[in-house]
Amino acid sequence: MKFGKEFAAQMVQEWQEAYMNYNHLKTILKDVLRSRTLRGAPSPVAAATSHGSLKRRVSLYRAFSGLTGRYRGSPRKSEDEVILVSAVQENGGDEHYQTMFLNASDEGGEKELVFFRSLDDEFNKVINFYKNKVEEVMGEADDLSKQMDALIALRIRVDDPVVGGSNIANLAVPGFSSVSASVVHPPINSTNPGWSRMEVIQEVEMSAEANSEDSNRGTNNENSNTQRKTNGYKKDMKTFRPASLEVLDHVKINVEPETPVSTVKNVISSSKSELSYSKEELRKAEELMTHAFVEFYRKLRLLKSYCFLNQLAFSKIMKKYDKITVRNASKSYLNMVDDSYLGSSDEVTKLMERVEATFIKHFSNGNHRKGMNTLRPKPKKERHRITFSMGFFTGCSAALLIALVVLIHARDILNSEGGPKYMDNIFPLYSLFGFVVLHMLMYSANIYFWKRYRINYAFIFGFKQGTELGYREVLLLASGLSVLALGGVLSNLDMEMDPRTKSFTAITELIPLALLTLVLVIIFCPFNVIYRSSRYFLIHCALHCLFAPLYKVTLPDFFLADQLTSQVQALRNLEFYICYYGWGDFTTRTNTCSGSKVFESFYFVVAMIPYWFRFLQCLRRLFEERDSGQAYNGLKYFLIIVAVAARTAYDLRMGMTLKIFAAATSGAATIMATYWDIVVDWGLLQRDSRNPWLRDKLAIPNRSVYFVAMVTCYIA
C-alpha cells in the first residue's frame, strides 16, 4: 500500500484536518518535477536505475547525494547550501519554524520555494495542534488525579466509616460514563490503622509537577547514598502524594443509580437527603473511574500515534523531495523535526507510564497483564464461522424467497378463493418479521460505514468493551431471522395446499405465533448465548424509552426511539397479533379487529407511542440542559403526534372535516420535520461552510453521498 493511503487510513477522524496534508505537498512536488522536466534536467528515476531498485530508499538516497555535483554543476560541501531552518519567536506568542531555500534563484526554484513554504505551514499547524492537545491532556490528568484521590479515600471510608472521626457524606465522581469492569481495591489490614490506610491511598501523580520531579531525580543520580535517602525520600513523598481523607469534606460524589423512583423523589424534594454509603455504590464509582482511565489512556495512545504518523509523513515527503530535485535537504529538515517539540517532547509517554502504573495498582490489584488488557483491549478477531454462517443463511433466504415466488405464481394463490383472506389475516403476521429484517439490514450497513470511516461507534453508544456487534454479526442475525420467517410462510402455504394437512387448520395458523414466541424467548433468554450483552443492552434502552422521561436521556435511548418512529407499521402488526390470537377466530382464518372499539383505540395509541417517547425525551433534556433547541425538537414531535392522530382518525372514520384537518396537520408536521432533518440533522444550507451547502466536518470525503442520502431518506 502506498504511504499516502496508509497515512490516511490511520488518521483519527476527529483530528483529520490537523494532520500534515501529505497529498497537497505531493501535488506540489509533482509541479516541481514537471518544471525540472521542462527545462531539461535529468530524471532522478533514470539516474537511479543503475544503483538498484527504487524500493531501496537508503541506496537511492546515497546515490542521489553522490550525483548532486554532476547535475548541479559542483559538489555540495554542506547541507546548509540547500536550506536553512530556524525557529522564529512571535511577539507574545509561540515560536514558529521557517525554512529559507537558498536556491530560489535557480531555474524552476520558485516551485521549490512554494513547496518549502507549504511544508512550513503544515509543520507549524501540526506542532501547534500537538502542543494544545498535550496541554489539554495534562489538565485532564490533574482532574483525574484529584478524582482518584477522592476514590481512594472513599474506599477507606467504606471499609471503615469511622476513620478520621466522622461518618461519610454524599460522594461522587462526575464527568464520566459508566462501563462495567472488574475492579479490585487493595485490602486494608494492619494493626496501625492510620499509617496502613495512608499507605493504601498513596497515588502516582499524573501531572506536570510529577514529570518535573522525575527529571529532577534523573539529574541527581550522582548524589551520595545519604543524600538519596533523605532528599530522595522527600521527593518520593511529593511524587507519591498521599490523598488526605479530608478530601471527602470538599467533594460531593453522587453515584446514586437513576431510576424512576429516584427521579420522582428528586422532583418532589427540593434537596437531596444525605446517603449512607455501601460497597455497591463504591463499586459503581470504581466503574466510572475505570471507564475514565480507559478512555483517557486511549486518547493518549491516539495522541502518540498522531505524533509518530506526522513525523513519518515529514520524513517521507522530504525523501521524495530529495529524489525529485537530486538535492540533500532532508537531513537538515528532519534534524529540525527531531529537535522540535514534536520530536523531543516525552510528556505523553511519561503520562502513559503513570496511567499504567496507577491503573495496575488500584484497579487490577497489581496484575500487570490484567490491567493492560483492560487499558489496551485487543481488537476483536473476525471469526470465519460467522462469515460462513452469514453466507449460508443468506443463500438459504434467497432460495426460500425464490421458491415462495414460484409457488405463489404456479398455484395462482393470490387469485384463488382464499387469497384475499390470506392477505388480510396472515400477511400482517409475517410482515412484522419483514420490517425487523429490513431494519437490521440497514443497521448493519450503518455499522459497516462507521467502521469504514473509523467512527468509534462502540464508545459513542456506550457498549460494553469488546461486546459490540460488527456488521457481520448483525447480518447473521438478520439472515437467520429471514430464514425462519420465509420458512414459516412457505410451510404455511404448503400445509394449506396439501390435502393431508388441510384439516389441521389450527396448527397451520399457529406458525406465526410460534415464530414470534421463539424470537421473544431468544431476546429475553438469561443464558449467555446469542450475544446476551447486546440483547440486554437493547432491553435496557427499550425500558428507558418506555419510562421516559423518568430516566436521564442518553444517546442510545433517543437513537432507539428515533428508530422506532420508522417502525409504526411493525408495532401495529404486533398489535394485530394480540387481536388475531386473542379474540379473533384464527382457526377459521377470520378476525373481528376492524369492528372492535378497543382495537381502534389502540390503533391510535400504537401509532403515536414512538413519537410520544421522543417528545418526553426532548422535555427531559430541555429541563436538564436548558437547551432551547430541544423545545423546537419537542414541538416537531408534538406536531407529528397530532398529524398521526388526525390521519389515523381519517383512515378509520373518513369524512371531509377529518380529511382537511389531517391534511393541514400533516403538511405542518412535514414542513417542520423536513426542515429539522435537512438543516439541523444533516447540516444542509450552511452558507459559510468550507463544504458547499454542508457542514464543516464531514465523516465521508465524497460530498455527493450526503445529498443522495438526504434525497433517499426524504423519499422513504
Image (tube, rainbow, N blue to C red):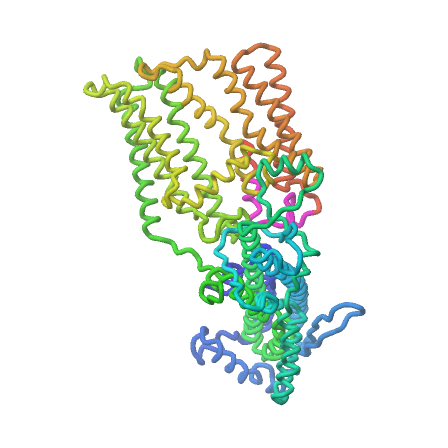
Seen in the image, is 403 located left or right of residue 481? left
Residue 524, given in percent of the width and then of the height, sits at 41, 37
Q: Residue furthest front?
A: 191
Can residue 31 be seen here? The reply is no
Name above or below for residue 278 compared with residue 32.
Answer: above
Task: Tell me the quarter of the picture where residue 582 sits.
Answer: top left
Task: Tell me the quarter of the picture where residue 201 sits.
Answer: bottom right
**Residue under the image location 49 percent in, 15 percent down:** 598
Q: Residue furthest left?
A: 500
Magenta-drawn stretch contains 292: no
Residue 630, given in percent of the width and then of the height, sits at 67, 36
Seen in the image, is 500 located left or right of residue 527? left
- Please tell me which residue lies in front, 576 or 390: 576
Seen in the image, is 452 located left or right of residue 71? left
Prevalent SS, magenta region? loop
Magenta-drawn stretch contains 690: yes
- Please tell me which residue lies in front, 420 or 485: 485
Residue 483, given in percent of the width and then of the height, sits at 32, 35
Task: Tell me the quarter of the picture where residue 429 sits.
Answer: top left
Residue 393, given in percent of the width and then of the height, sits at 32, 41
**Residue under the image location 44 percent in, 44 percent down:** 534
Can residue 242 be seen here? The reply is yes
What segment carries the magenta color? 689-708
**Residue under the image location 69 percent in, 56 percent down:** 249
Seen in the image, is 130 located left or right of residue 406? right
